[in-house]
Image (spheres, rainbow, N blue to C red):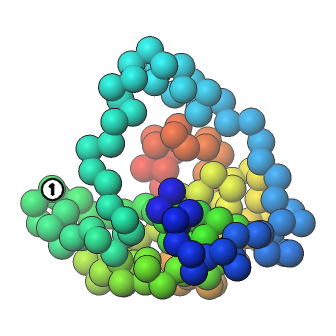
Amino acid sequence: FFFQSLPSLKHNCLPSDRLSATMVQSLNAAALKTLTTLLLRPSLTVPHLSVPSVSCIDYASLRRHAGIRAIAFDKDNTLTAPYDELLHPLARNGLQEALATFGVENVAILSNSAGTLDDPGGKDADAIEKKLGIAVIRHQTKKPGGLEEVLSQ
């Protein structure tokens, strides 16, 4: 995770009181199924591209050359420090560029906690949407599964 090596985050490494009091994770069957696949085909674990932050991605090029029309970010270790609702400074420019390129209606967060059955009533999702200004996708199947569910929304 790219944020783990940032010394400026040491004060933010612990969950906030509000989120840590309610943070519960359920069994992720889709991840276990994917793990089995990866054990059988380890070449799938090699990243094709690695960047230090979302601010290093050329979103306009993705739209223009790859035909990408929307983007979903993970929250923890991508836009924020784990269990934090504040946008990390290193992610700020990247999120702004994604919003300018795709529009707010085509940029969202896909989390394995906020917006799932682990987030009763969507309280964490609502708080994150308010803080970051982008939608949190509500879904039942956790990543890496659930792509069909998300695309149908």
Displayed quadrant of residue 14: bottom right
| Residue 115 in sight in this render | yes
Query: How many other residues sit within 10 Å of disc 1, few (<14), some (14-19) or many (≥20)?
Result: few
**Residue 129 position in % (x across, y down):** 60, 78
Q: Is residue 143 above or below residue 81?
A: above
Is residue 126 found left or right of 149 in the rendered image? right
**Residue 87 position in % (x across, y down):** 54, 81
Name which residue type carries label 1. Ala
- Residue reaching furthest to the right: 21
Q: Secondary structure at mark 1?
A: helix
Q: Residue at x 29, y 71 (%)?
A: 56
Badge count:
1
Pointer 1: what residue?
66
Displayed quadrant of residue 122: bottom right
Q: Is residue 22 above or below residue 9?
A: above
| Residue 136 in sight in this render | no
- Residue reaching furthest to the front: 7
**Residue 137 position in % (x across, y down):** 56, 61
Between 109 and 4, the one nearer to me in the picture: 4
Q: Residue at x 61, y 41 (%)?
A: 141
Between 137 and 131, the one nearer to me in the picture: 131
**Residue 119 position in % (x across, y down):** 76, 59
Q: Residue at x 55, y 43 (%)?
A: 143
Is residue 53 found left or right of 63 in the rendered image? right
